[in-house]
Image (spheres, helix red, strand yellow):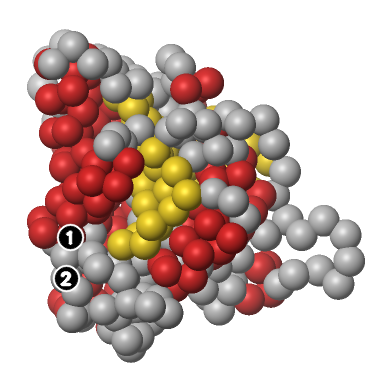
Amino acid sequence: MTGLCTGRVVVVTGAGRGLGRAHALAFAAEGARLVVNDLDVGLDGASGPGDASHPGGAPGPDSPAARVAAEIRAAGGEAVAHTGDIATAEGAASLVTTALKTYGRLDTLVNNAGFLRDRMLVNLDEDDWDAVVRVHLKGHFLPLRHAAAHWRAEAKAGRAPGARVINTSSGAGLLGSVGQANYSAAKAGILTLTLVAAAELARYGVQVNAIAPAARTRMTERTFADTMAAPAAGFDAMAPENVSPLVVWLGSAASEGVTGRVFEAEGGRITVMEGWRAGPTVDKGARWTPADAGETARMLLERAEPPGKVYGA
């Protein structure tokens, strides 16, 4: 490895398994010191054991976070575990505090934690909506807010932080996904949160980007079983480790100048997503009648690029 992140302190949420674990190990391999966060819940956020006895983040001895941290240390790296709920103010604050108390600094935040409660829209109840939006969207906002407050203070004290944030969206957030209205809405919200944070935090030396990964995790291997299955031989395109190199680069000093961008990452493919842009337009310079507005809208749609297909449609 190149030591791309030597000296940097990196926090990864949801790092006990899947993409988060792959990211943590990849950062450690490049010399970073890690705070490995994982609450240890089930796929739906409710059926697993969790760690409710330690809301501030103290790890259980055999929690997924502790196991990943131990794996990093066994390979010669530095890592501590954190099991707080990052979708609470207390848990998010303790996440940042853990990095500062353990290592004296914080350089990179990777927001990755999440779970699924898939239902078709007419069967989706309020609890399932609230739980998924909470862990994905609020679970991005709160760690970002607490980390940003620290970096703002550093910048105002004359210590430019050179900080990095990598948020985790999804193809569902870009295009939508049948049976995943709650997840799709949360992941779409993460995209615009990324854009706002990049604009607001640039003055403090903080870069904020997002990824939309496709990889085999607990959340995808059941929902998209055929697509996510590992091949018997050859390149495993859906291995989560394929996504991590881009995340490590975005979280390093080498990504200087890259902010407010969204990348798709799958297998050996990296794509810059270009988002909403103005397409065909007509300005009448006066108020439309409903009939004329409709006729014009149809004409514009004929000239516009067709939308991407919703996953599962």
User: Vertical placement of 151 versus 234: above or below?
Assistant: above
Q: Can see residue 238?
A: yes
Q: Amino acid at mark 2?
A: Pro
Q: Is residue 15 left or right of residue 6?
A: left
Q: Is residue 130 left or right of residue 230?
A: left
Quarter holding residue 163:
top left
Q: Amino acid at mark 1?
A: Gly
Give how far across and how far down residue 57 sits, in percent.
23, 65
Q: Secondary structure at mark 2?
A: loop
Density class for disc 1 (Cα within 10 Å; few <14, some 14-19, many ≥20) is many
Q: Secondary structure at mark 1?
A: helix
**Foreground residue among 22 and 174:** 22
Give how far across and how far down residue 94 sits, in percent.
18, 55
Quarter holding residue 262:
top left
Quarter holding residue 147:
top left
Q: Is residue 313 left or right of residue 61?
A: right
Count of marks, rendered view: 2
Give how far across and how far down residue 63 sits, in percent.
40, 76
**Foreground residue among 180 and 49:** 49
Q: Residue beneath label 1, please?
A: 91
Please give the name of the residue rendered at 24% of the width and 42% of the height, measured from the top-left corner. Answer: 100
